[in-house]
Image (cartoon, rainbow, N blue to C red):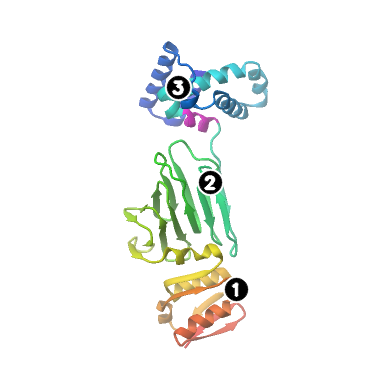
Amino acid sequence: MVSYFKNLIRKKQHNEADTARIENAIADFKQNPHEWDEARMGVQSELRDQILSRVMASMPAAGRNRYQRRNWGIAASVALVLGTGWLGFHYRENILDVIDPATLVVMKTNGHEIKKLRLSDGSVVWLNGGSRLSYPDRFSHDKREVVLLEGEAYFDIHHDDKKPFQVKAGKTLTNVLGTAFNIRSYSWLEKISVTVTRGKVAVNNSMLLPNEQLAYDKATGKSKIKKLSAEEVTLWMQGRLSFNDESFKAVATILENKYQVSIRFQEQKMEDYRFSARFEPSDSLNDILDALTMTRGLSYKVKGAVITITN
């Protein structure tokens, strides 16, 4: 059985140096067996049951019956080896991952929906409308990684010095140990933005502190950092709309996707007008358009689902 697990690790690692360490650790264990240390290794019966259940689930039905006759003793022996010394601490989760690989989950929200989910490490994520997040049903022993495929999400990350948390969004990579931040990465927006509310966040080659936002331009690949109120950026979690020095083009695109309309401009220069504004969940699309156009001396016409901004 030990050789069975060793082969599984070899398939997982593809690393001769690690394989040699495994073999040495197993040989050392055979010559110098250790007693189970529950304070250091956890409850032996729980690890044994965990190993057994994953092995049984990975076997065909015919093999399970034959294996069941001698399973508990073997599982207990493997648990003892896994819980001992370098082999246990470095490879226990890796072996369990090989037996029962983590499953990728994709959480989706529609245009008006906000969802909250808790990841396997205790981290909490809120998804804004029209978003998709890919994440494993459990994290591996050495890393925590999720992908924001589309949309906006707020992350409140459980602190773990040994497992950095990574969020991929487009061509940005956000690295943290334990902090809180917001990422907006809609495919129809020109920029990806990362805003920090608590702690430190590394985005690509930049470091962000609370109330700082990095904006990554998809077209140029360049990033800019500015100070702002992170609280304003995360008002969407309360169902509110907030624009912080946004171009009218970006505002229009956000409104198009939220209200399923098409917004056009009579003159192209209008797209570059900038707005800072906050709206409540009770505000209608007409309320928002009235407020935005009034500040610039503009008006708008509505024809079905098409809105035209005019002078």
Q: Position of residue 14 (x, y in %)?
A: 41, 30
Which residue corresponds to the image point at 48% horizontal and 24% vertical from the top-left? 83
Tell me the tag on residue 84. Answer: 3
The magenta region covers: 92-99
Tag 1, which secondary structure? loop
For badge 2, the amino acid type reads Leu
Residue 199 belongs to magenta span: no
Asked if residue 10 can be seen in this view, the reply is no
Magenta span dominant secondary structure: helix
What's the amino acid at mark 3? Thr
Q: Which residue is mark 2?
A: 119
Q: Is residue 94 found inside the magenta-colored segment of the image?
A: yes
Q: Is residue 256 above or below residue 297?
A: above
Query: Relative to residue 130, is residue 267 drawn left or right?
Result: left
Q: Residues within 10 Å of mark 2 (few under 14, many from 20)?
A: some
Please name whichever residue, 295 or 7, is drawn nearer the observer in this view of the structure.
295
Residue 266 drawn above or below residue 200: below
